[in-house]
Image (cartoon, rainbow, N blue to C red):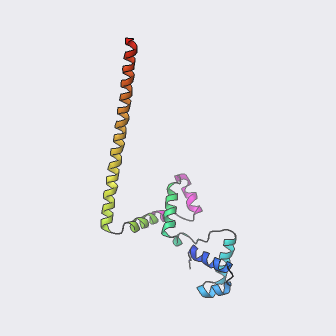
Amino acid sequence: MNFSSEFKENIVKKASLGSSVVELSEEVGVSKCSIYSWIKASQKGFILKTGPATLGLSEKQTLLLESRSIADNNMGEWLRKNGLCSDHLIKWKKEIDNTMLKTNDEKIEFKRLKKENEELRKDLYRKNQALAEVTALLALKKKFIHLWEDEEK
């Protein structure tokens, strides 16, 4: 049976506060061997995670964000280091999207806002380009006037 890292940490804390491993084992229904291995792992500084299935939504989101900053050629190494495969990332992205957008109306509104955002970005880019062009023309006009003044003198 897979236990969450929070559960394991709580058991290790109880054991470190003086609770007997035998009593903890009977209380929570976990074998003594498992509890002893969790204590040993925590003493060595290992993270008590059992894999991707035990991760919470916020942990998944953090890993997704972290994965976006990893270069493609380093992605395999990063996935192995975290005990993941690329399918996990795809599945988690869908899970987070579905959690965030529960109703059909919210999905439609999200798509509309996304399209509007893209149009505004394009408009802003176009206006920035126009502003840069006008600035360049104004600078050239000033230089041209300055050159004519020098020739007249």
Q: Quadrant of the C terminus?
A: top left
Residue 115 x, y percent position in the rendering: 32, 54
Q: In this view, does 98 lie to the left or right of 27?
A: left
Residue 38, located in which quarter of the rendered image? bottom right
In magenta segment, residue 96: no
Residue drawn at point x = 60 percent, y = 77 percent: 10
Residue 90 x, y percent position in the rendering: 45, 63
Range drawn in magenta: 71-90
For this rendering, which residue is in front, 92 or 72?
92
Residue 112 x, y percent position in the rendering: 30, 57
Residue drawn at point x = 45 percent, y = 66 percent: 91
Give the total of numbered labels: 0
Majority secondary structure of the magenta segment? helix
Residue drawn at point x = 59 percent, y = 85 percent: 28
For this rendering, which residue is in front, 33 or 15?
15
Q: In this view, does 62 lie to the left or right of 127?
A: right
In magenta segment, residue 87: yes
